[in-house]
Amino acid sequence: QVQLQESGPGLVKPSETLSLTCSVSGYSISSGYYWGWIRQPPGKGLEWIGSMYHSGQSYYKSSLRSRVSISVDTSKNQFSLKLSSVTAADTATYYCARMYYSDTTGYYPHFEYWGQGTLVTVSS
Amino acid sequence: SYELTQPLSVSVALGQTARITCGGNNFGSKHVHWYQQKPGQAPVLVIYRDSNRPSGIPERFSGSNSGSTATLTITSAHAGDEADYYCQVWDSSTVVFGGGTRLTVL
């Protein structure tokens, strides 16, 4: 069974960099799939941040691209999110997830497995 | 940027059929996926590629895509189906989520 678990600071100061790690068990990241981050501000809907393949191919939400970096560490079977210059608007529950991308019939990106989420608050 | 439109809320009587819609431009060329999110929990994929159910999802959940609107249908609604439901597509190398629909089971 594929399981994902987010970890990282629950409180980040404004203008600093938010850093989170997602540990994956039950599947080797280097075997395939994209690995992504989604966030949800309190009381609001889901917002995709970005997704990365183990070999480095990545996609990011355009409005966040200048501040976001996703990386994969296959040796630790983890992937990470860095979001720079955070403000209160970045306060959210952050989820990591495995993203199915495509097969021989086409492209159907969607998220099959999710972590439980971690709340990150941006405040001084 | 691409937008998906969902009703804010849908109500259904216990045991009846609930239908949650999702709309967007040029929908016919896209495949729609649906997630269920209960309070305090992570989203769960309930329908992928318009009408496919992941293993473990009850047959009561079904999906369709008419080309202009996608619909998540929940037959014989249970109290446990009360949740937020989000549709999602892939557009221009971007994941797009709908705003979400709160399903209330009366």
Image (cartoon, coloured by chain):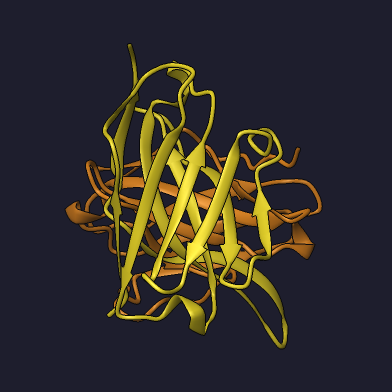
Determine the residue positioned at 37% across, 19% down.
Answer: A13
Q: Which chain is rendered orange in the image?
A: B
Which part of the image, by quadrant, shows the N terminus of chain B? top right
Which part of the image, by quadrant, shows the C terminus of chain B? top left
Side (left or right) of A55 relative to A27: right
Q: Nearer the viewer, residue B8 or A46?
A: A46
Determine the residue positioned at 71% across, 39% down.
Answer: A62
Q: Residue furthest bottom?
A: A104
Side (left or right) of B77 relative to A36: left
Determine the residue positioned at 38% across, 45% down.
Answer: A20
| Residue A7 visible in the displayed image | yes
Side (left or right) of A63 relative to B9: right
Q: Position of residue A22 (x, y in %)?
A: 36, 57
| Residue B101 visible in the displayed image | no
Q: Which residue lies furthest to the top in this view?
A: A124
Is residue A120 depicted above or below A60 in this figure? Answer: above
Is residue A55 depicted above or below A23 in this figure? Answer: below
Is residue B9 depicted above or below B61 in this figure? Answer: above
Q: Position of residue A100 (x, y in %)?
A: 54, 72
Colour in which chain A is drawn: yellow
Q: Where is residue B102 in the image (x, y as percent from the top left)?
A: 37, 39
Q: Where is residue A58 in the image (x, y as percent from the top left)?
A: 66, 59
